[in-house]
Amino acid sequence: MSEILADPLPLDGDAPEAARVFDEVLLSVDNITLTFGGVTALSNIGFDIRKGEIRAIIGPNGAGKTSMLNVINGFYHPQQGKITFKGEERRRMRPHNAAKQGIARTFQNVALFKGMTTLDNVMTGRLLKMKTNMFWQAIYWGPNQREEIKHREFCEHIIDFLEIQAIRKTPVGRLPYGMQKRVELARALAMEPELLLLDEPMAGMNIEEKEDMSRFILDVNDQFGTTIALIEHDMSVVMDLSDRVVVLDYGRKLADGTPAAVSRDQKVIDAYLGVGH
């Protein structure tokens, strides 16, 4: 493992006392196996994500966390297993189909258009919502102009929500890394997703930036009702934000449950801190 927890796993008292309860399954992953040649990235993985919850996916480097997100949003196609989203079974989903169905994501390494402004980057998240044809888009008049104004107003609302008004006209390539992460979150929210996949949203951030991002994630879940699945290495963030946690290790599921239960699981402690602990 190339990355070890900066702090020990929280004690039972550090985990949230009152657990929220969610009954409706939004997405289920059943017996997913993903291989690349002779390397098995995921082996018989199964878990579910329930509507309205914050679901954390954790594990050491190389555990298969990002591969799992890539399977969920259709970038990878597993050799075995199935994914069911909103009651419909999906076997070979493409990323653009996943986006149309209501799945948005951010990436471990920021994937923005660096020469474009914050507002223009956020506007790209509305492309799937635009209905006018290429002719009207080319002349920017009539129906297209009215439609773009409507979508721009929505994006301005997202920009206000994430408190990035001051950089709305700034090319994102000139922004610090933590702020670029926030812009990427804004672009994902512009898609109005039902399920938001966040791949290490706190990576590379200082303490203050992590506190801000944590607040925004909670607000997105609470105010927009967005279901969230996130990968995160900072265990204090995982314990504070998540309703349930699934732990992967070397492509296998190690544990699944509430943050308090997972923090007590000896197999999880061994995977992070070594069998001798």
Image (cartoon, helix red, strand yellow):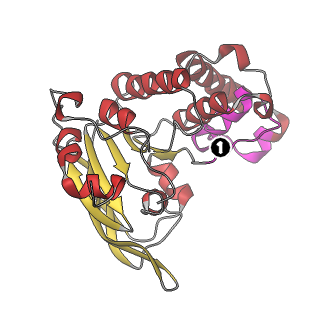
Up-down relation of residue 161 to residue 189 (above or below): above
Q: Quadrant of residue 64?
A: bottom left
Q: Is residue 10 visible?
A: yes
Residue at 74% x, 28% y is 175
Up-down relation of residue 171 to residue 87 (above or below): above
Where does residue 153 sit, x and y in percent of width and height?
62, 20
Left or right for 40, reference 258: right
Left or right for 10, reference 165: left
Left or right for 241, reference 76: left
Left or right for 207, reference 137: left
Q: Residues within 10 Å of mark 1 (few under 14, many from 20)?
A: some
Q: Is residue 8 magenta?
A: no
Where does residue 134 sit, x and y in percent of width and height?
76, 46
Q: Is residue 226 visible?
A: no
Residue at 83% x, 40% y is 138
Say which of 235 and 269 sits in front: 269
Which residue is identified by label 1? Answer: 110
Residue at 83% x, 37% y is 115
Residue at 34% x, 60% y is 248
Q: Is residue 135 magenta?
A: yes
Q: How many marks?
A: 1
The residue lying furthest to the bottom in this view is: 38
- Residue range highlighted in magenta: 109-137
Amino acid marked by disc 1:
Val
